[in-house]
Image: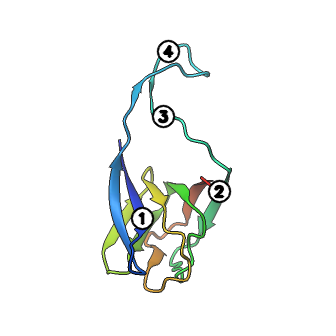
Amino acid sequence: MEIVTFKNDNEGGTFFSSETITLQFGINDFLTASPLLSTAHACQRYFFSELPPGYQSGGDFSSRRQICVLLSGELEVMSTGGETKYFVAGDVLRLEDTNFQILGRTLRVTSKDPARILNVQIE
């Protein structure tokens, strides 16, 4: 399984990278079967958010490290260097970019429906 990561560079900007999450056989507390699972990671809290159609952020859309799962709608995320990635329902984005004072990065809802997101804050 691959996820996209959005990070700070060492020059005051942002960039995308990707990470492959390894799934292995494991025991799931909710099932008697042994499905494929990733390594477990601790989290601080989670919440749901909804962004309306046409929403566009300023440069302050991630002040904490978090995993975002797009539940519905479509998003466009642009780095300070102009690289753009598009996300649809089911996509996962890890936000490691916590310097909310950086300008030039944006998040925009591109669908005609709201973007509903599960935000899991790592710290």
Q: Few, some or many C-alpha atoms within 10 Å of disc 3 (few <14, some 14-19, many ≥20)?
A: few
Q: What is the number of the mark on residue 33?
A: 4
Q: Few, some or many C-alpha atoms within 10 Å of disc 1 (few <14, some 14-19, many ≥20)?
A: many
Amino acid type, mark 3: Thr
For image coordinates 33% across by 73% down, the residue present is 84
User: Within the image, what quadrant is residue 25 found in?
Assistant: top left
Assign a secondary structure to mark 2. strand
- Mark 2–mark 3 distance (CA, rounded to whole Å): 23 Å
What is the quadrant of the N terminus in the image?
top left
Amino acid type, mark 4: Ala
- Mark 3–mark 4 distance (CA, rounded to whole Å): 17 Å
Q: What is the number of the mark on residue 6?
A: 1
For image coordinates 38% across by 76% down, the residue present is 79
Residue annotated with mark 3: 39
Amino acid type, mark 2: Phe
Amino acid type, mark 1: Phe
Q: Earlier in the sequence, mark 1 or mark 3?
A: 1
Assign a secondary structure to mark 1. strand
Q: Earlier in the sequence, mark 2 or mark 3?
A: 3
User: Within the image, what quadrant is residue 15 found in?
Assistant: bottom left
Where residue 63 appears, as percent x and y from the top left, is 60, 70
Number of the front mark, 2 or 3: 3
Assign a secondary structure to mark 4. loop
Please, which residue is most extreme toward the bottom here?
A: 103
Residue annotated with mark 2: 48
Q: Few, some or many C-alpha atoms within 10 Å of disc 4 (few <14, some 14-19, many ≥20)?
A: few
For image coordinates 47% across by 21% down, the residue present is 26
Assign a secondary structure to mark 3. loop
Q: Give the answer, above or below, for where 87 lies relative to 12.
A: above
Number of the front mark, 3 or 4: 3
- Mark 4–mark 1 distance (CA, rounded to whole Å): 34 Å
